[in-house]
Image (cartoon, grey):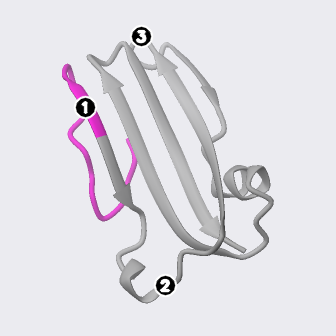
Amino acid sequence: MPRSPVVPPFGFDVNITKAPVDITFDKTSIGSKRGESSSYSILFSIVAFGDASVYAAAREGNITTVNQIDCDLLNILGLYTRYTTVVYGE
């Protein structure tokens, strides 16, 4: 289950949640580059794969200095879940 200042409900529902991971985002510049990485689970995590790490997202966006991190969760009845880490920086 993802942990951040905003913890979305998790269960047998359809849920689309986007939230910042850091509570000091109002004091941070976003940066000109963006990268994202995702992990997936199917059938209540019987099958899970992917890499939603900050490192993978920064590498995908060619970012060397991370300024801001957001998360994006999509859950469809527990049958399909996608967790995406989005990073911004330079």
Badge 2 is on which residue? 28
Q: Residues within 10 Å of mark 3 (few under 14, many from 20)?
A: few
The quadrant holding residue 15 is: top left
SS under mark 3: loop
7 or 76, which lies in front?
Answer: 76
Q: Estimate the x, y position of residue 37 in percent, counting from the top left.
A: 63, 43
**Is 30 a magenta residue?**
no
* Quarter containing the C terminus: bottom right
Q: Marks 1 and 3, how far apart in space?
A: 15 Å
Badge 1 is on which residue? 15
**Amino acid tagged 3:** Leu
| N-term mark: 2 or 3 | 2
SS under mark 2: loop
Badge 3 is on which residue? 43
Asked if the residue under mark 2 is in contact with the one under mark 1, i.e. CB atoms within 8 Å, the reply is no
Q: Estimate the x, y position of residue 53 in percent, counting from the top left.
A: 64, 50
* Quarter containing the N terminus: top left
